[in-house]
Amino acid sequence: MSRREHSFINMMEHGFSVEIKSKDHVSVIQLANDPRGVLIEGNLGKIQSIKVKDDAVLIVQGENGTIRMDLSSRQLFELLAKEEPIRKRPWV
């Protein structure tokens, strides 16, 4: 596979990581061979920051841990633009 093909594939796939400070903040980890897939649930605590680092990684930092995802700011804004406008959401 060429470097260009590899770069294109990486742009189409989005890796992620979840780092939690203590297992006390993890409520569910379901890794069984289940048709519903894998489930990871927990408590990040109060959100301290949300940022896009180096225009490549979305970082959600909470008191209890961090979620990182390969996602550029352009991709994030494009995805948000597809969502229903906030003013039409009944819960806002």
Image (cartoon, rainbow, N blue to C red):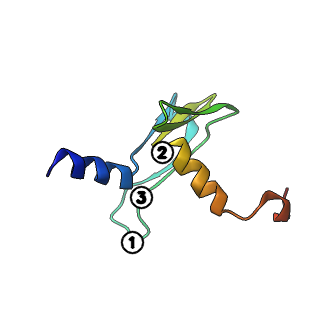
Quadrant showing the C terminus: bottom right
Q: Quadrant of residue 49?
A: top right
Mark 2 packing: few (<14 Cα in 10 Å), some, or many (20+)?
many
What amino acid is labelled 2 in the image? Leu
CB contact under 8 Å: marks 3 and 1: no
Q: Between label 1 and label 2, give the one nearer the viewer.
A: 2
The residue under label 1 is 35
The residue under label 2 is 71
Residue at coordinates 47% horizontally, 30% vertically from top-left? 54
9 versus 88 height, above or below: above
> Mark 1 and mark 2: span between their CA atoms?
26 Å
- Left or right of 55, for residue 34: left
> Mark 3 and mark 1: span between their CA atoms?
9 Å
Name the secondary structure under disc 1: loop
Residue at coordinates 55% horizontally, 31% vertically from top-left? 65
Q: Quadrant of residue 83?
A: bottom right
What amino acid is labelled 3 in the image? Val
